[in-house]
């Protein structure tokens, strides 16, 4: 396939169990990327497999299942390409977790599609707003969230790795 054909492939986003092989692979890739970027910035090295296993255990995804959560997986054509988790923090507030698009699929609209699907899922769970946190070194993520209408808010939890917090008000369902 040439580049023009690849860009025209459809994106599809659907809920998937956290324990499925595709979801597990995406969540591990997500955690490896953010851990590698952190360790490269702060310690001049990449993460070890043991550190990734520990991080996955410290930040489990088991709450990303109905009725108070969901893991959404994006496919570009037939290729598994990304994911985002949504979970309720309270009756009116949802939180985005593990937003990730594989590097080979970035810049093709998948992240925007995942955000839109996540907002829809949050609204269907009754949320009026969506919150998230990220790190300042994840500049692409910060820019993506701002571009999609998220505004910076005060810290809403005490995770040591979270440096910047965002929120977006959801439109009332019609």
Image (spheres, rainbow, N blue to C red):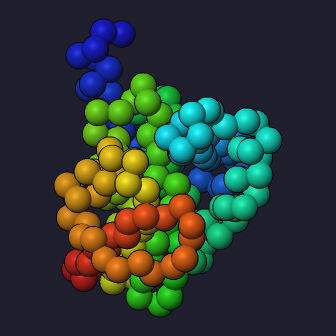
Q: Position of residue 150 (x, y in %)?
A: 26, 66
Asked if residue 39 lies left or right of residue 47, the reply is left
- Looking at the image, is 116 positioned above or below residue 21? below
Residue farthest to the front, as pictured: 43
- Looking at the image, is 19 positioned above or below residue 110? below
Of 125 and 28, nearer the camera is 28
Residue farthest to the bottom, as pictured: 91
Of 113 and 142, nearer the camera is 142
- Looking at the image, is 104 positioned above or below residue 124? above
Q: How many marks?
A: 0
Q: Position of residue 168 (x, y in %)?
A: 28, 73
**Does residue 82 appear in the picture of this structure?**
no
Residue farthest to the top, as pictured: 2
Q: Residue 32: which quarter of the image?
A: top right
Q: Residue 21: which quarter of the image?
A: top right
User: Which residue does the image show at 23% across and 59% down from the upper left?
Assistant: 146
User: Which residue does the image show at 45% across and 81% down from the upper left?
Assistant: 156
User: Which residue does the image show at 57% across and 34% down from the upper left?
Assistant: 44
Task: Please state, as top left, top right, bottom left or bottom right, where the C terminus lies in the image.
Answer: bottom left
Q: Residue 148: which quarter of the image?
A: bottom left
**Does residue 11 appear in the picture of this structure?**
yes
Of 47 and 124, nearer the camera is 47
Q: Position of residue 112 (x, y in %)?
A: 29, 49
Q: Position of residue 30 (x, y in %)?
A: 56, 44
User: Which residue does the image show at 38% across and 65% down from the upper left?
Assistant: 164
């Amino acid at each position: 396939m040439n580049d023009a054909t690849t860009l025209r492939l459809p994106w599809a986003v659907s809920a998937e169990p956290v324990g499925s092989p595709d979801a597990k692979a995406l969540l591990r890739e997500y955690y490896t990327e953010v851990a590698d970027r952190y360790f490269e910035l702060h310690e001049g090295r990449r993460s070890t497999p043991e550190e990734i296993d520990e991080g996955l255990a410290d930040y489990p995804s088991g709450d990303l299942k109905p009725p108070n959560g969901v893991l959404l997986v994006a496919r570009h054509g037939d290729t598994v390409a990304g994911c985002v988790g949504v979970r309720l923090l309270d009756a009116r507030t949802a939180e985005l977790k593990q937003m990730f698009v594989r590097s080979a699929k970035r810049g093709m609209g998948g992240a925007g599609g995942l955000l839109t699907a996540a907002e829809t899922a949050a609204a269907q769970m009754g949320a009026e707003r969506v919150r998230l946190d990220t790190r300042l070194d994840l500049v692409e993520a910060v820019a993506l969230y701002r571009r999609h209408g998220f505004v910076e808010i005060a810290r809403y939890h005490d995770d040591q790795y979270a440096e910047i917090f965002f929120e977006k008000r959801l439109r009332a369902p019609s």
